[in-house]
Image: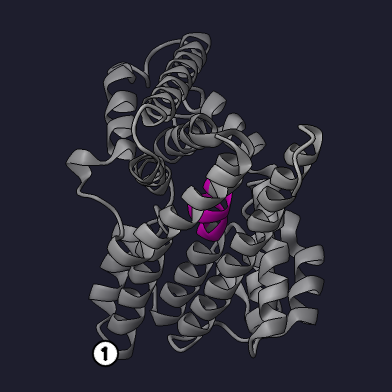
Amino acid sequence: MRPVERLITMYLAIALDILYGDPPNRYHPVAWMGRWITWLQPRTAATGSTGRRFLHGVGILISGTLLSAFFGALLQRMAHHVPIPVRWFILALGWKTMFSLRGLLKAAAEVHDALIRHDIVQARQRVSWHLVSRDTRDLNASQVAAATIESVAENLSDSFIAPLFYGVVGGLPAAFVYRYVNTADAMMGYRSPEYEWLGKAPARADDALNLLPARLSALLIVAAAALTRADARCAWHIMRRDARRTASPNAGYPMSAMAGALRVELEKRSHYRLGTGPSPQANDIPRALQVVRVAATLGTCLFSVILGLSWLASREGSGEEP
């Protein structure tokens, strides 16, 4: 896709997400990616040799990556054989299925709704179903709020900035590849007897692909804090101090920036503490969502500028008048 076409389809994709959200799972490409990963996982992963499990994980990663790139390229090529308005819609629909900002904000808002009604059981269920993979059965209200804030900060990168970034850089094939790798890591990247070696290759690939988007997301959170009632200076300070305290080389950046922006302490027991201040409460969740909305808007503006400059450069290179 040419830069101007990527710019148009990016805006259409974001509009589709805002207006309609995600399609049903039976039609969703990410659900198909999940089925592929599940089908390829060995039933004896916990008993196979370390090397065999690692190589099987590499196979799952490579096969899905190639298929994702192929289908992204195929959809992109097929779209160029239809009239322009339809082409843009097809490309936008394909790109939209690779990210979900509306779903993320809605899931966090549902947890907030349960917390302000003092329904801790439902709050735990909602944060577990939609936002985190940790055991939430014994979390108190403050810990549920913290888990929600951590998730929206991390998923600003995973579920929005990164898919847009790779779509801007490499079109639908790159966006599809990113989402497959991220899905494989979400399904297999655990430190357990079954997945320690099976999921190592997807986990490392996801770490590599998220190096730039995670840091960009953290900077966008700092900038968004300056435009809201959050604390931009504290966000910058805490990000620089605490970003490397998480096991993930990437997740700590947006989460620590958010902790500083809200001036709260985000803690995952026995894992990390990010920020300085009181534990978050239910009413800190809407503050985090406001920062995420502004950060997502700033990210969209940044990608728009990049695509606009690329379009102007391509026109100048071809000798056309801007």
Residues 159 and 256: in front is 159
Q: Amino acid at mark 1?
A: Arg
Residue 153 place in picture, x, y as percent: 56, 65
Residue 266 place in picture, x, y as percent: 59, 72
- The magenta-colored residue range is 155-163
Classed neighbour count for the residue bearing mark 1: other residues with Cα under 10 Å, few (<14), some (14–19), many (≥20): few
Residue of label 1: 117
Residue found at the far front of this picture? 321
Q: SS for tag 1? A: loop
Query: Residue drawn 68% across and 66% down?
Result: 220
Query: Is 4 situated above or below 127?
Result: above
Residue 184 place in picture, x, y as percent: 43, 32
Prevalent SS, magenta region: helix
Query: Would residue 138 be seen by someone viewing this image from the given angle?
Result: no
Query: Residue drawn 48% across and 34% down?
Result: 172
Query: Is 225 situated above or below 307?
Result: below
Query: Would residue 129 be seen by someone viewing this image from the given angle?
Result: yes
Residues 319 and 39: in front is 319
User: Exactly how many numbered labels are in the figure?
Assistant: 1
In the figure, is residue 158 to the left or right of 128?
A: right
In the figure, is residue 229 to the left or right of 105?
A: right
In the figure, is residue 26 to the left or right of 37?
A: left
Q: Quadrant of the N terminus?
A: top right
Query: Residue drawn 40% across and 69% down?
Result: 105
Residue 52 place in picture, x, y as percent: 47, 9
Quarter of the image where one finds residue 111: bottom left
Q: Quick check: is 65 in the magenta stretch?
A: no
